[in-house]
Image (tube, rainbow, N blue to C red):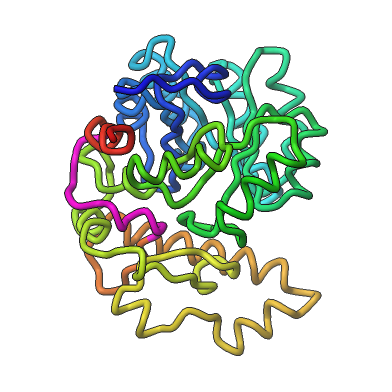
């Protein structure tokens, strides 16, 4: 097996330059432990736990299971996450090796983590925001490209990675479009220090989601990934199931009109986001014709439901 030596493998001391992405509803402690044991860095969203007690229990399980291997937690840092302060404190208490920030300023996270030696990686979709987080002291950027699952970016990896490398001094981790060794090599050749991979791990034995969701990751391909604004009001990638085809990909005229109303749009967005997340949760854990399955284009390379360790092997073996 090839030995990898990149800024990411050196920074967090992993065998392979891969982060198992923190996936809303999907990632859990068992997946993180198995990912870390397989030579990559597992991560989990703090929001996957409803209470601080549950979050702390999961972090203790991970810490006990991975030993000195690196793992990470994703924090939503904007005002929509009313539990941010509590979640950050818990991460600090456990000295989580790295934090991935999304959807808001990472400044308070960086300020709090630096003294403890905790790394902070920031999700970005363009150069302007990358330069902002670099100035704040981020350790790396996670470049979310247009092949990513969930809230994807607007640029292809071939556009985004070279732009970031040209303008930034910190490492660039590419997110989106990697489902096999060829995809990994593609990102590394563009100059990325590593990759963040999510969708292929949904079809893992350890994932807590329904068998129907896992089988959809196997059965559908990249051509079946579409963007919808119905879930959160902003474009989100989902599998184009018959239900998604039936209801369409765009908000209806009333939803659009309410979203533009200056006096209530803030509350409309909150309600839309809440309803969308509930729809995702219902689809992820139960069989229903109303299926919203979030995924990215890398499902093209998924052929079977496998253990996390085997999925990792498929990503690194030539």
Q: Quadrant of the C terminus?
A: top left
Instruction: Give the residue drawn at x 28%, y 33%.
Output: 317
| Residue 312 in the image, given as x and y percentages of width and height | 30, 33
Q: Quadrant of the N terminus?
A: top left
Instruction: Give the residue drawn at x 35%, y 73%.
Output: 240
Instruction: Give the residue drawn at x 41%, y 25%.
Output: 16
| Residue 54 in the image, given as x and y percentages of width and height | 42, 31
Residue furthest out toward the bottom: 253
Residue furthest out toward the front: 189
Report which quarter residue 300 is drawn in: bottom left
Q: Is residue 56 left or right of residue 27?
A: right
- Magenta stretch, overall SS: loop
Q: Is residue 204 above or below residue 275?
A: above
> Is 302 in the magenta?
yes
| Residue 229 in the image, given as x and y percentages of width and height | 54, 72
Q: Is residue 88 above or below residue 230?
A: above
Q: Is residue 171 left or right of residue 182?
A: right
> Is 196 in the magenta?
no
Instruction: Give the residue drawn at x 34%, y 40%.
Output: 181
Q: Is residue 169 left or right of residue 300?
A: right
| Residue 145 in the image, given as x and y percentages of width and height | 56, 54
- Circle count: 0
Range of magenta residues: 294-308
Which of 236/188 is in front?
188
Which of 214/265 is in front?
214
Report which quarter residue 251 is drawn in: bottom right
Which of 136/264 is in front?
136
Which of 268/181 is in front?
181
Report which quarter residue 238 is drawn in: bottom left
């Amino acid at each position: 097996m090839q030995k990898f030596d990149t800024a990411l493998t050196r920074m967090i001391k992993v065998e392979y330059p891969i982060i198992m992405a923190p996936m809303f509803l999907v990632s859990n402690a068992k997946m993180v432990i198995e990912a870390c044991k397989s030579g990559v860095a597992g991560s989990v969203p703090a929001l996957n736990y409803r209470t601080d007690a549950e979050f702390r229990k999961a972090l203790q399980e991970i810490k006990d299971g991975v030993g000195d291997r690196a793992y990470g937690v994703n924090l939503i840092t904007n005002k929509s996450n009313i539990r941010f302060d509590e979640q950050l404190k818990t991460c600090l208490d456990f000295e989580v090796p790295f934090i991935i920030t999304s959807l808001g300023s990472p400044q308070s996270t960086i300020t709090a983590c630096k003294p403890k030696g905790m790394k902070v990686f920031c999700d970005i979709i363009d150069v302007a925001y990358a330069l902002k987080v670099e100035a704040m002291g981020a350790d790396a950027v996670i470049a979310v490209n247009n092949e990513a699952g969930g809230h994807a970016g607007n640029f292809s990896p071939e556009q985004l990675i070279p732009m970031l490398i040209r303008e930034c001094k910190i490492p660039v981790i590419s997110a989106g479009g990697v489902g096999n060794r060829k995809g990994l090599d593609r990102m590394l050749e563009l100059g990325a220090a590593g990759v963040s991979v999510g969708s292929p791990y949904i079809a893992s034995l350890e994932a807590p989601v329904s068998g129907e969701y896992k089988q959809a990751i196997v059965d559908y391909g990249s051509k079946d990934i579409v963007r919808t604004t119905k879930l959160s009001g902003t474009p989100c990638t989902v599998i184009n199931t018959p239900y998604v085809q039936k209801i369409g990909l765009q908000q209806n005229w009333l939803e659009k009109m309410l979203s533009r109303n200056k006096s209530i749009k803030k509350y409309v967005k909150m309600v839309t986001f809440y309803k969308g997340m509930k729809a995702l949760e219902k689809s992820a854990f139960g069989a229903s014709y109303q299926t919203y399955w979030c995924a990215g284009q890398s499902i093209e390379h998924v052929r079977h439901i496998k253990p996390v360790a085997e999925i990792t092997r498929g990503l690194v073996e030539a």
